């Protein structure tokens, strides 16, 4: 596969007035993994920037939780409470004072309900956790979360820099788009972030060459 790169500078405006995005409440969804912990300084930095409340949320048992006998549900919840305490103690190195919530059920549905109930403005996820975000974030579960939660979703990948809050800043933003309406709807978020952090914003759309074009190109090199 190859792609064509076209570069052009355009002037666009960030949302203004009542159209601006207000981040007052944030959910950090965690499976207690190291990658999930790596998302903490990013959440802390965004929360400090917007003076936002943070809720640390763990969903127990995935979709099978409600099928477990009551004693097993209680054991799973107690174990999650223990792990949450350890996670928050580790996170306290960055000084956050956050609320925490533990609930059993299907992650996408629980996060959707909490997002609506708490009027959440941003959901943050760490990806590729050792134990878990394969079931919690990747694949079809990720699609369900992105599709149904009523707020923007920020994912922190395994290659993201491990940083303390003071070091987290947006110096350059990349907005990848397939030009679909849902992608265009996300553009105001990127524009506002670029404006608030005085950071350049690059819009990227990748156009794949057809198989025929690829064959002709390869044939011309012979």
Image: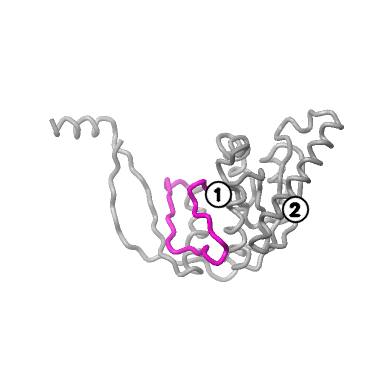
Q: Which residues are magenta?
A: 157-180
The x and y percentages for residue 175 are 44, 54
Residue 100 is labelled as 2
Label 1, on which residue?
Answer: 155
The x and y percentages for residue 187 are 48, 56
**1 or 2: tag closer to the N-terminus:** 2
Q: CA distance from mark 1 to mark 2?
A: 19 Å
Q: Is residue 159 magenta?
A: yes
Residue at 58% in and 36% down: 134
Residue at 55% in and 67% down: 166
The x and y percentages for residue 214 are 24, 33
Label 2 crowd (10 A; few <14 / some 14-19 / many >=20): some
Using residue 202 as the reference point, say whether residue 106 is left or right of it.
right
Q: Secondary structure at mark 1?
A: strand
Q: Please identify the quarter of the rendering in which residue 4 is found.
A: top left
Label 1 crowd (10 A; few <14 / some 14-19 / many >=20): some
Q: Give the answer, above or below, for where 210 lies relative to 16.
A: above
Q: Give the answer, above or below, for where 89 lies relative to 20.
A: above
Q: Give whichever of 144, 15 is nearer the camera.
A: 144
Q: Are marks 1 and 2 in contact (CB under 8 Å)?
A: no
Q: Is residue 173 magenta?
A: yes
Q: Give whichever of 123, 117 is nearer the camera.
A: 123
Image quadrant containing the N terminus = top left
């Amino acid at each position: 596969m190859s792609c064509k790169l076209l570069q052009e500078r355009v002037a666009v405006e960030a949302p203004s007035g009542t159209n601006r995005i207000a981040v007052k409440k944030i959910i950090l969804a965690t499976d207690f993994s190291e990658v999930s912990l790596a998302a903490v300084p990013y959440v802390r930095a965004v929360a400090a920037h917007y003076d936002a409340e943070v809720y640390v949320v763990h969903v127990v048992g995935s979709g099978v939780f409600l099928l477990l006998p009551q004693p097993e549900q209680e054991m799973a919840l107690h174990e999650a409470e223990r792990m949450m305490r350890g996670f928050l103690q580790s996170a306290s190195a960055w000084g956050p004072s956050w609320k925490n919530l533990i609930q059993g059920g299907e992650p996408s549905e629980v996060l959707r309900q909490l997002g609506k109930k708490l009027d959440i403005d941003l959901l943050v996820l760490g990806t590729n956790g050792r134990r878990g975000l394969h079931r919690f974030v990747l694949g079809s579960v990720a699609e369900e979360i992105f599709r149904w939660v009523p707020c923007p979703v920020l994912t922190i990948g395994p290659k993201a820099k491990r940083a303390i809050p003071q070091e987290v800043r947006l110096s350059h933003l990349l907005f990848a788009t397939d030009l679909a309406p849902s992608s265009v709807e996300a553009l105001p978020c990127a524009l506002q972030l670029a404006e608030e952090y005085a950071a350049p914003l690059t819009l990227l759309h990748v156009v794949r060459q057809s198989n025929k074009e690829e064959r002709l190109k390869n044939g011309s090199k012979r």
